[in-house]
Image (spheres, rainbow, N blue to C red):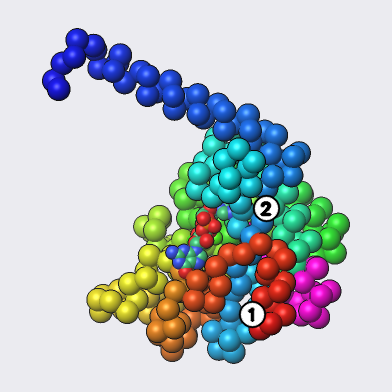
Amino acid sequence: AKHNGKSSWERFAPQMKELSHERLQMESRMRRALELDEFELWYQPIIDAATGRVTGAEALLRWNSPVMGLVMPDRFIPLAEETGMIIPIGRWVIEQACAAAKRWEEATGTALNIAVNVSPRQFRDPEFVSSVQQILTACDMPADRVELEITERLLLDSSIEAATILQELDATGIRLSVDDFGTGFSALSYLKSYPFDTLKIDKSFVADVLGADDNSALVRAIINMAHSLSLTVVAEGVEEAAQATFLSAHGCDFLQGYHYSRPIPDADFLAWLRIR
Ligand code: C2E
Ligand code: CA
Ligand code: CA
Ligand code: CA
């Protein structure tokens, strides 16, 4: 239908209204979610490629909403970022993740590492570094068992500011990792100039690792480059045994993905650790 008599705005407007209504509703629900204790952290194990042992876990946020059900992070983190709510939520994430790692240690006798995702808005909060330090002290968590996962996106704008924060974090002994490596930033020089410890190869590369030769060559090149810069390499999105075999054969240090376990709730993760 070319013309139904309405301007394009009029035809578009109802949809816009609906979208912003939905957004507002989500926003007000999210404001209460923290106090109503609706957020949950799920955990996915990270495996030492050489020994097959679990060395730690990545904490992944879920919103268990009584109205919307289990909401995945891609659906609410962007809004949490825009509204700044990611700052208190993100602080809660770090607290919960450290407390969980402590509990696992008490329950199993093994000191596991914990990785948490940090979004740009949260990272730029002037209180961020001190709040992280406070949490570590309160949980009695050694800094070098905590890894903050940051995407390359963060380095794109005001990189001088980012450099300062990264250096401050590095000075606390916390580990820093580049998440989704290969999907964002094109220049690689930043890897040399920032104090990263770990590089996480994005799952889109891992998915293709056994396909075309080009992709396997790319992954091997990433591993070699990371090692020559003294970075540890984690492959995410490992779904098949053959991918794990390929990656360990080419020196990838750690593996993570559905092949080992999907992200699971805290209690299930502890049970998983015990039967392993
Ligand atoms: P991410 O940091 O890249 O996390 C990895 C995502 O891949 C997770 O999705 C995980 O469930 C999924 N995944 C793990 N193994 C496999 C696999 O073998 N195959 C496939 N296809 N996928 C796998 P999830 O949990 O939906 O999280 C999505 C994104 O949301 C995360 O991507 C991260 O960027 C963000 N996120 C999650 N939790 C937090 C948080 O606490 N704070 C912030 N700021 N962002 C978070
Ligand atoms: Ca991550
Ligand atoms: Ca470091
Ligand atoms: Ca990732």
Residue 10 is situated, as x and y percent measured from the top left of the image, at 30, 14
Q: Residue at x 44, y 74 (%)?
A: 239
Q: Mark 2 CB in 8 Å range of ligand 1?
A: no
Nearest the viewer among 19 and 105 is: 19
Q: What residue is shown with label 1?
A: 54
Q: Which mark is residue 40?
A: 2
Circle 2 crowding by C-alpha within 10 Å: few under 14, some 14–19, many from 20: some
Indicate which disc residue 104 carries. Answer: none
Which quadrant of the rendered structure holds the C terminus? bottom right
Image quadrant where residue 198 sits: bottom right
Q: How many marks?
A: 2
Span of residues in magenta: 102-116
Q: Quadrant of ligand 2?
A: bottom right
* Residue 255 locus on image (x, y percent): 52, 77
* Vertical placement of residue 136 versus 262, above or below: above
Q: Is residue 107 above or below residue 18?
A: below
Residue at 39 percent of width and 58 percent of height: 183
Would you say 35 lies left or right of 90 here? right
* Residue at image location 64% in from the left, 69% down from the top: 57
Depth check: give the residue in front, 241 or 115.
241
Residue 217: x %, y % from top left: 31, 78
